């Protein structure tokens, strides 16, 4: 059974992070296949782990999962403080719009997305990815829980409001399905 450790990302992890980005596929926005963005992410994490963050509730902490027997980087996870403070963070809220007519004895409900930015200052957990051949046996759980263990080391720094974004549905071509409402959908 392979044993794993979680550790802060290092500058020499660039090739491994780019491999994880490639393997993670489309829609995994926190692990982009862009060397400049990944280099910035690594530099920001190294700064955060060294204690050089600008304010108490800021910093991006990027961690690598390493197989102890081989030293291979097999996964990642991250914690980002101060969501929406330095860069806008938008999200969608699903609401239901209802229209009713008593004289026509009809009711129409329509789900709609409303753009909001209501999570400013939250801590975001994300970037959870494990290579397929290392999934199972608790590897994903270790990567996920390591984020909360990191936050527990300094609760005042990380705060108490946490959010997680989940990747949506994406097909093999990298497309996201859309729901189209027609008048037949209401019947």
Image (spheres, rainbow, N blue to C red):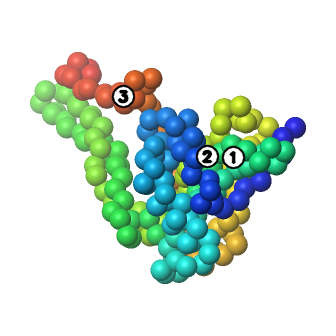
**Contact between labelled residues 1 and 2, with CB atoms less than 8 Å apart:** yes
Of marks 3 and 1, which one's residue comes earlier in the chain?
1
In the rendered view, does 156 fall on the left or right side of 107?
Answer: right
Of marks 2 and 1, which one's residue comes earlier in the chain?
2
| Quarter of the N terminus within the rendering | top right
Where residue 136 appears, x then y in whole percent? 75, 35
Mark pair 3, 1: CA separation: 29 Å
Q: Write down the residue under mark 2.
A: 16
Badge 1 marks a residue whose secondary structure is strand
Q: Is residue 134 visible?
A: yes
| Quarter of the C terminus within the rendering | top left
Q: Using the image, tell me which numbered label, if any, was put on residue 175.
A: 3
Question: Which quadrant would residue 95 be assigned to in this image?
Answer: top left
Q: Residue at x 69, y 46 (%)?
A: 73
Mark pair 2, 1: CA separation: 6 Å
Question: Which quadrant would residue 61 be assigned to in this image?
Answer: bottom right
**Mark 3 or mark 1: which is in front?**
1
Badge 3 marks a residue whose secondary structure is loop
Towards the viewer: 168 or 66: 66
**Residue located farthest toward the left when viewing the structure as drawn:** 103
Q: Residue at x 19, y 36 (%)?
A: 100
Q: Residue at x 50, y 73 (%)?
A: 58
Q: Using the image, tell me which numbered label, if any, was put on residue 73.
A: 1
In the rendered view, does 112 fall on the left or right side of 146?
Answer: left
Where residue 90 appears, x then y in whole percent? 34, 56
Of marks 2 and 3, which one's residue comes earlier in the chain?
2
Q: Residues within 10 Å of mark 1 (few under 14, many from 20)?
A: many
Badge 2 marks a residue whose secondary structure is helix
Question: Which quadrant would residue 104 be assigned to in this image?
Answer: top left
Where residue 170 appears, x then y in whole percent? 43, 30
Mark pair 2, 3: CA separation: 26 Å
């Amino acid at each position: 059974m392979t044993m794993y450790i979680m550790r802060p990302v290092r500058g020499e992890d660039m090739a491994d992070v780019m491999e994880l980005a490639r393997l993670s596929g489309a829609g995994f926005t926190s692990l982009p296949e862009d060397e400049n963005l990944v280099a910035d992410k690594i530099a920001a994490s190294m700064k955060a782990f060294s204690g050089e963050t600008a304010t108490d509730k800021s910093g991006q902490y990027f961690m690598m999962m390493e197989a102890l027997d081989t030293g291979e980087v097999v996964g990642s996870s991250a914690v980002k403080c101060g969501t929406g403070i330095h860069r806008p963070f938008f999200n969608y809220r699903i609401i239901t719009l209802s229209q009713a007519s008593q004289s026509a004895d009809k009711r129409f409900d329509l789900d709609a997305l409303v753009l909001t930015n209501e999570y400013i200052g939250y801590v975001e957990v994300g970037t959870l990815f494990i290579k397929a051949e290392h999934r199972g046996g608790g590897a994903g759980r270790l990567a996920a829980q390591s984020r909360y263990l990191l936050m527990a080391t300094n609760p005042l720094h990380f705060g108490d409001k946490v959010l997680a974004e989940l990747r949506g549905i994406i097909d093999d071509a990298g497309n996201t399905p859309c729901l189209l409402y027609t008048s037949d959908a209401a019947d």
